[in-house]
Image (cartoon, rainbow, N blue to C red):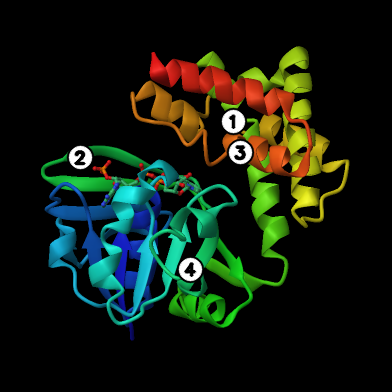
Amino acid sequence: MAKIAIVGAGAIGGVVAALLQTAGRHELVLCVRRPIRQLAVSQPEGELRIDATVLTRPEEAGPVDWVMIATKAYDAEAAARWLDGLCSAGAPVAILQNGVEHRERFAPYIAKDQIVPVIVDCPAERMPSQDGVDRIAQRGPISLKVPDSTHGREFVALFAGTAADAAAVSDWTTVAWKKLCHNAVGALPALLLQPAGVLRGEAIGEVALDMVRECIAVGRAEGAVLSDSFAEEVLAASRRSAPDSINSLHADRLAGRPMETAARNGAIVRKGRAHGIPTPANAMAVALLDALTAK
Ligand SMILES: NC(=O)c1ccc[n+]([C@@H]2O[C@H](COP(=O)([O-])OP(=O)(O)OC[C@H]3O[C@@H](n4cnc5c(N)ncnc54)[C@H](OP(=O)(O)O)[C@@H]3O)[C@@H](O)[C@H]2O)c1
């Protein structure tokens, strides 16, 4: 049994809360920035109402056994305000966010050895709230990959007996960069304001391949094992996705929210620069998305 705080009760925070509740042995605390009366998660198995203490102010937070941060990467600084109270007894902090810089992002706020970076794969989205109930829709299975460390294995154990494919992997760096390769091409539909089907065009496909090849080159310099043919695999996977599907950068842009550009294509550019690897396609995507945000 563990007392687990989830910071950010959006799509991934909600799905993770539902999983941990089905484990049947944990006490849950939801740390949110606006009050919620009830959180409900529709899973492939049916709807689950979350039974948790809800906190809205970081000053209310006391020590827990585990913290899971499930905000967008651009909300890291505000999310970190919860950590003083929640980690006052030394709780490890799992960062369930996209990108490859989980440790760097939270290093200003917490000791690096307390941080467990998590690569999440799961199609999930927030639905409009109805009758005072905040709803999350989980559209498919969830996979959670952490480094094979003591805290990583403890994290996996929290999900024992649930439907999550939670695993500690020996080469987390490769898992993270593979996910970033997939995320890199998401900038194109977000820029064009067209759903995933736009990647089926020949010329756009070539640009997508350039973006993934840059990500592969930088990922290799960071220690990831990525084959040349992975670029074609990523494009083929993007083209297999439903042509009307909308990725999260695109969804954030449509909703007028900030976008995770810095954590995704921005990370490729920054780390490329550090290794002396040119990343012009990703740099252009970042410049255009940033200009749109500034506008
Ligand atoms: N959704 C997916 O299918 C998916 C799949 C794989 C990976 N991911 C990654 O998982 C991460 C989380 O994404 P998501 O889709 O779950 O985002 P989301 O649905 O936008 O949820 C983020 C939640 O964090 C809350 N929040 C922001 N700042 C906060 C703070 N200071 N204190 C408490 N709560 C705060 C937001 O509150 P409000 O409700 O007030 O906005 C929102 O409920 C991202 O890095 C994303 O790229 C998502």
Residue at the image point whose x is 45% and y is 71% from the top: 111
Q: Residues within 10 Å of mark 4 (few under 14, many from 20)?
A: many
Image position, residue 289 (x, y; %)? 51, 21
User: Are circles 1 and 2 on residues that touch, CB within 8 Å?
Assistant: no
Q: Is residue 8 visible?
A: no
Cα–Cα gap, marks 4 and 3? 23 Å
Cα–Cα gap, marks 2 and 3? 28 Å
Cα–Cα gap, marks 3 and 1? 5 Å
- Residue flagged by tag 4: what amino acid is it? Ile
* Residue 131 vertical placement versus 191 (above, below): below
Ligand 1 within 8 Å, label 3 CB: yes
Camera-side mark, 2 or 4:
4
Residue in front for this viewpoint, 291 or 67:
291
- The residue that disc 4 covers is 115
- The residue that disc 2 covers is 129
Q: Residues within 10 Å of mark 2 (few under 14, many from 20)?
A: some
- The residue that disc 3 covers is 183
Ligand 1 within 8 Å, label 2 CB: no
Cα–Cα gap, marks 2 and 4? 32 Å
- The residue that disc 1 covers is 186
